[in-house]
Image: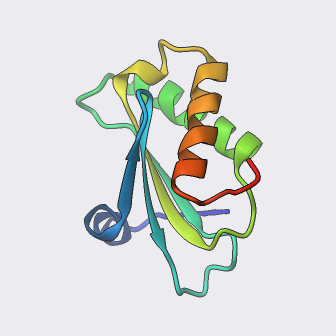
Amino acid sequence: MDTIKSSAEISSLFKQGRRFSTPYFTLIASRTKSQHGLDGRVAFIAGKKSGNAVWRNKAKRRLRSIRLDESPTGFNCDVVLLAKARITASSYEEVRAAYRDVLKKARLAEQV
């Protein structure tokens, strides 16, 4: 899965994508008809309002690790994972379970 690097593309996802919230993060997803392959793309965002640089790095590391562990392949969707303040205070297993649930709710993964 590739990453989304353009702020314009991230902004368009914020406007057009469907939002699914958990206590730890918000998933914003939008189906793509692009040349980026069947795996889609992803962006990890941890805002400055939520914490300092150490907190933001820890939050993004946690989001990247659950995405690698749990993401299915072939869902052809651009995804933004927006960290919330509780993500670093909770256990990895809680965040992973929330990620599985939100993928099912978003119908991005039928088998997770």
**Would you say 58 lies left or right of 6 here?**
right
Question: Where does residue 109 sit, x and y in percent of width and height?
Answer: 67, 57
Q: Residue at x 40, y 68 (%)?
A: 6
In this orientation, which residue lies closer to the viewer: 49 or 89? 89
Total of numbered circles in the picture?
Answer: 0
Question: Where does residue 53 sit, x and y in percent of width and height?
Answer: 39, 26
In this orientation, which residue lies closer to the viewer: 77 or 106? 106
Question: Where does residue 69 sit, x and y in percent of width and height?
Answer: 75, 41
**Would you say 80 lies left or right of 94 here?**
left
Quadrant in the picture for residue 110: bottom right
Q: Residue at x 74, y 56 (%)?
A: 72
**Would you say 88 lies left or right of 72 here?**
left
Q: Residue at x 31, y 23 (%)?
A: 51
Question: Where does residue 95 sit, x and y in percent of width and height?
Answer: 57, 27
Q: Is 92 rendered above or below residue 38?
A: above
- Classify the position of the N terminus by image quarter: bottom right
In this orientation, which residue lies closer to the viewer: 110 or 22? 110
Q: Is 40 rendered above or below residue 35?
A: above
Q: Residue at x 73, y 47 (%)?
A: 112
In this orientation, which residue lies closer to the viewer: 60 or 17? 17
